[in-house]
Structure formats: structure tokens, C-alpha cells
Amino acid sequence: MDEKRIELISELARQYYLEELPKTEIARLHGLSRFKVARLLEEGRETGLIRIEIRNNLQQQEQLSDRLAEHLGLRRGVVVSSTGDDWEVRERIAQSAAELVSAQLRSGDALGVSWGRTMLAMAHHLYDLPPTSVVAITGTVGDDLNESPVEILRTIADVGAVATYPILAPLFVGSEQGADTLRSDPVIRRTLSRISRLDLVVMSVGSWQPRITQLADSLTADERGTLDRDGARAEILGIFLDDDGQQVAPSLGQRRLAATPQDLVAVPEVIAAAGGANRALAIRAVACSGLITTLVTDDHTAIALLEQPAVTEAVWAR
């Protein structure tokens, strides 16, 4: 096929398939018959110059989800589109997490939830829950009550016959003695005792390096320095993990009011909902820990995770 013929067929294809001009109009513009235009378009398809591709995004996302789960050693991966701004991606992740929660919860089950924007968005996507106990698995972080576990529990309570169990105290208490005092409070003790009996947990993932977490202000300068020196990469529920999923600075747990790694290992299903390629290393660290069973993320983050070494062994075995 000579160059002029290639250029002609390419122009016809552009006008027909991209501009959606009718063949009669294309024929008029080029001084050809409608039948000649049709034959040239057919020639372009037969020679491979014109290639029509139908992309099934749903099927691609399912395949990517399966690859991601296998790569990270998880039971399940759910990958959503990263099209749009951060808010749109977070909403998709939150909605998918909510769908997983709704599909798995049964009457009488106990659901544990953490804090943050993704968790609050997930709460708004939950509908018609069965009679369920919803338990906060951390205390509060910062002073924005809209992102606190208390607000998340209140939002979930509006959509079903839900009994809520908050932790009305900070995630990190000012001192170990203060944390011990709060743990002895009957209301807080009741909530903490329920954490080890949860059927399902859904939580977010924070990154320590790079800093994508609100917890830095809850720690002292010495504690932040220790985490940096010891290679902290990720944070979940105030539990800090290095690249291999090992816990860093476990002594911080002495003033932490939240679920422990041992609590999470005992939960049959733990869903992490987190996106953003800048969180990929943190998410991989959490997968290495073995503390989660399912990851809901976006496709850009999934691809970034697949570029990292596969997870072959978990720190905390289930």
C-alpha cells in the first residue's frame, strides 16, 4: 500500500470512527462514492491499518484485582478506577469497601471501624445493615470530629439497627499512666473488650514515609525520631510497621487506645481501604504484616504495588 493510500484511509477512518461523520458526507468531502469509502475502510481493517479495540474495563479491573491479591498474599483485592481527582477516587474506594462490608455482615455480627476521611465516606455508602454491633477500634485523632470514629459510628447508626461502642478518648494518651487509667474506665473497657470478638474490620492505611498521616502531632519529637531511625514505613491504628511488616517502636502501645496486632489477627476478615500511589510502599508494608486480608485501592496504586517485590511471607500468621 503506497503512502498516499495510507494517508487517505487514515483520514477516512478518523472522520468515520472519531468524528462520526456519515459515509455519504465523507464521500462528498473526498469526491468519492459512498461504496468506495466503505471499501477503503474495509481495506484498512483487513490490513491492520485500522484496528477496532473494545476494552472491557470491568474485566480488566477484575484481572488486576486478582493479580494484586496474589502479589500481596491477600485473600482478595478490589481495584477501582483512578480517573478523576482525589475526592472522586476516595469516594470509589469508600463505596467499594462499603459494598464488601454490606455483603459480608450478618445479623448479630460485630464490625470494627477506624477513623479518617475514607472511613467516613464509607459510612455514608452503607445502607440497610442488619442488626449489628459497630465498634470503634481506635480512639480519636486530632480535633476534627467529622473524621473521628465517633462521627463514623453515628453515621453508620443512622442506616440500621446498630449498637455502637465508641472509645471516648484519644488514640494516643499523653502518658502511659493516663492510658492505664482510661483503660480502667468501665465504658472504654467495655469497648476494648469487644475488639477481640469482631467478625469484620475495615480501616484506612497511613504512610509514615512519606508522611501521609495525622499522627505525627500525637507523638513527641523523640518518638518521631525513633520511628524515622527504625525505618517506620506505614501506620495502621497507631501501629507502626517497617518495609517488611515488622512492628516498629512497640513501646508506643503503652499509651495507645486501639486494637493490637493480636486483635487484628483474630478477626476473620480485615479490609484495608487506601489509595494513592504515594502510599504504595506503606500498603505493601501492611500486606507484609499479615494484619489485613483484603485491600481496596485504585488502579494507579495497584500498578505501583505490582512493581514492588511480591509478598511471600507474613509477619503475623493467621
Image: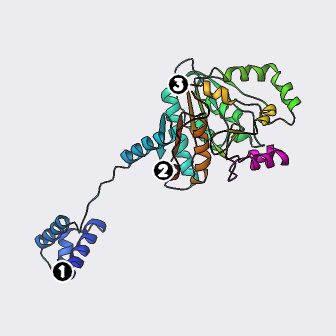
Residue type at numbered disc 3: Leu
> In the rendered structure, which disc, 3 or 1, sits on the residue that comes first in sequence?
1
Residue 173 image label: none
- Residue identifier under label 2: 299
Per the image, is 213 magenta?
A: yes
Q: Position of residue 112 (x, y in %)?
A: 63, 28
Residue 197 image offset from top left, x and y in percent: 63, 20
Disc 2 on helix, strand or loop? helix
Q: CA distance from mark 2 to mark 1?
A: 41 Å
Q: Where is mark 3, residue-wise?
A: 105
Q: Nearer the viewer, residue 166 or 68?
A: 68
Q: Earlier in the sequence, mark 2 or mark 1?
A: 1
Residue 313 as seen in the image, left or right of residue 228 = left
Residue behind mark 1: 2
Nearer the N terminus, badge 3 or badge 2? 3
Q: Is residue 3 left or right of residue 107?
A: left
Query: Residue at coordinates 57% horizontally, 20% vertically from top-left?
Result: 109
Give the image quarter of residue 38.
bottom left
